[in-house]
Amino acid sequence: MTVARVNVKGARRWLSGHPWIYRTDVTERPLMDAGAVLVHDNRGKALGWALWSPLSEISLRLLDRDAEAVIDQAWWDERIASAIARRVPLEDHTNALRLVHGEADGCPSLVCDRYDEWLVVQFMSAGLERFREEILASLRSLVEPSGILARNDVQLRAKEGLPRETVVLHGDVPREIEVHEYGIKFLAAPWTGQKTGAFLDQRENRHFVGSVARGRALDCFSYHGSFALHLAKKATHVTSLDASGAALMRAADNAARNSLDNISFVEANAFDYLREKEREGTTFDTIV
């Protein structure tokens, strides 16, 4: 059995609830490439299983505190199924959501987002890459997606000694996917958009600000206009502000998709624009 041994500081970090152990706290490196290893403290006591990344500053990522666990296909099936089950209530409000959120779901360095019938994944550690096939098998079985895209283009992968790439791992994935969110529709771009295609983590904030919006509203750093779309449901007028003309073109298309005609689009640096409006004495009732 391959073992990593850690010092008192590393062991204490896990015992206090932190899911990582850093390179400087590993006193005995596993004699293997990246993968799953059993972790022992300096007295030889087993602390649990971790993903091992030989080149990373984050050497050990906690997988399972049970030293008797077997990290195999069944383990990944159970862990991913539990993560997906926690999101079931969200399906009443949206067709785009994060199914697996890394350490928060006990699947360190794994991100999996669902966009309608497609999945976008990110494998962000060398240790996790060792289990790519098991994870893909779980996702295909549990979700039955039409396609799975890997947005493995994040800088973090370079620090793990992994290539940065965007590749289809299963089926086919379109360049644009329509997201439905609390009655609002907008296009996500899984191949080229921010994050895995859209800022899914802001869904509840968008819904909330849309529920309290009033009067003249300003959406700074609007990107593709997802906040502006929610604002426009209650505000009398919305200014969608972004430095990217291309992003604002997408925002305008999204507004048309929702039959919203009370949004104007301004291409400008947000800080310059705000200073200008302050000098003019212009005010807004709702600002994001």
Image (cartoon, rainbow, N blue to C red):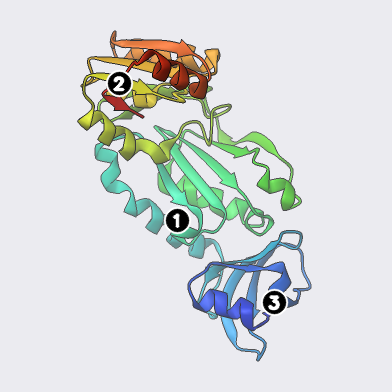
Of the 4 image quadrants, the one containing the N terminus is bottom right
Name above or below for residue 135 compared with residue 122.
below
Task: Please give the residue where the numbered disc 2 appears in the rendered image.
Answer: 284
On the image, which quarter does residue 39 sit in?
bottom right
Task: Please give the residue where the numbered disc 1 appears in the rendered image.
Answer: 80
The crowding category of the residue bearing disc 1, from other C-alpha atoms within 10 Å (few below 14, some 14 to 19, many at least 20), is: many
Query: In x, y percent, where is residue 260?
Result: 28, 12
Q: Amino acid at mark 1?
A: Ile
Distance (Cα) linking label 2 and label 1: 44 Å
Q: Amino acid at mark 3?
A: Ala
Distance (Cα) linking label 3 and label 2: 57 Å
Query: In x, y percent, where is residue 204?
Result: 31, 39
Residue in the picture at 75% in, 63% down: 54
Task: Please give the residue where the numbered disc 3 appears in the rendered image.
Answer: 4
- Among numbered discs 1 and 3, the one appearing first in the sequence: 3
On the image, which quarter does residue 282 sit in?
top left
Tell which of 270 and 139 is nearer to you: 270
Query: In x, y percent, where is residue 35?
Result: 67, 63
